[in-house]
Image: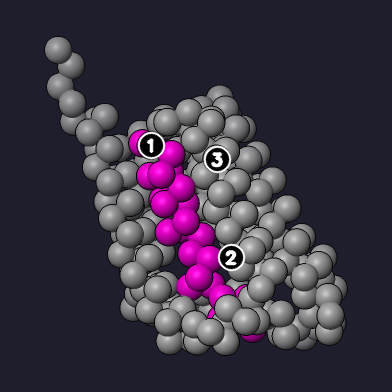
Amino acid sequence: MSYIEAILALFAIVDPVGNIPILTGIAEHIPKGQSQKAFNTAIIVGVLILLVISFAGDAILSRIFHIHFADLQLAGGILLLIIAIDHLIIGSLRRSVMVTGTFSPYEIGCVPLACPLLAGPGAMVTSLTTLKSSGPAKAIVAIAVVFGILWLIMRFIEPIHKFLGRMVCTVFSKVMCLFIAAIGIHMIMSGLQYYFTVPK
């Protein structure tokens, strides 16, 4: 996996453009003028979550739960496929991150913005598999680039949302779901290959 492929894979999972309507909706539950604090908190916490999972996840899985990397690829691939199908057809997983009431920017920046919206299970699995299959440098670069783009989008989210409109954001999100499904299938096939490869 090249740097570009690693970035595109994580970009498709996090889906910064497709999440714009959700981000603006959640921002309505933050005290006026403090939405940027919530967004900055979400970026910092999201990056930390993915870095910790990427570097410590494999040790936890292999030493504590005795799970092989191929098992993670299979489970992660199935998870990404479910996420893609849900976003394309049902959308219940995305609706589940919507909140009611008013919260502090730091509370809402951690949950649900950082997790599960930005650094959710799909992003965690993608970051971990990227590190395992392609090395830590590509995982770190992918996380840095994608969350850098996210920060820029959040910084100018209102004008971007007005320019693109809900329809464009929705269509973009649906297209990203096709890439997520393809990534999921690839991970499933990679995991199965480990078990069905005949030793020479």
Depth check, mark 1 against mark 2: the one in front is: 1
Tell which of 127 and 144 is nearer to you: 144
Under mark 3, the amino acid is: Val
Depth check, mark 2 against mark 3: the one in front is: 3
Residue drawn at point x = 27 percent, y = 51 percent: 185
* Among numbered discs 2 and 3, the one appearing first in the sequence: 2
Q: Is residue 75 magenta?
A: no
105 sits left or right of 59 in the view? right
Tell which of 164 and 137 is nearer to you: 164
Q: Which mark is residue 141?
A: 3
Q: Residues within 10 Å of mark 2 (few under 14, many from 20)?
A: many
Residue drawn at point x = 71 percent, y = 80 percent: 27
Residue drawn at point x = 48 percent, y = 73 percent: 18
Under mark 1, the amino acid is: Ser
84 w.r.t. 119: above or below: below
Label 1 SS: loop
Q: Quadrant of the C terminus?
A: top left
Which range is magenta? 1-25
Residue on which disc 2 sits: 117
How far separated are the C-alphas under marks 3 and 1?
Answer: 11 Å
Residue on which disc 1 sits: 2
The quarter of the picture where residue 56 lies is top right
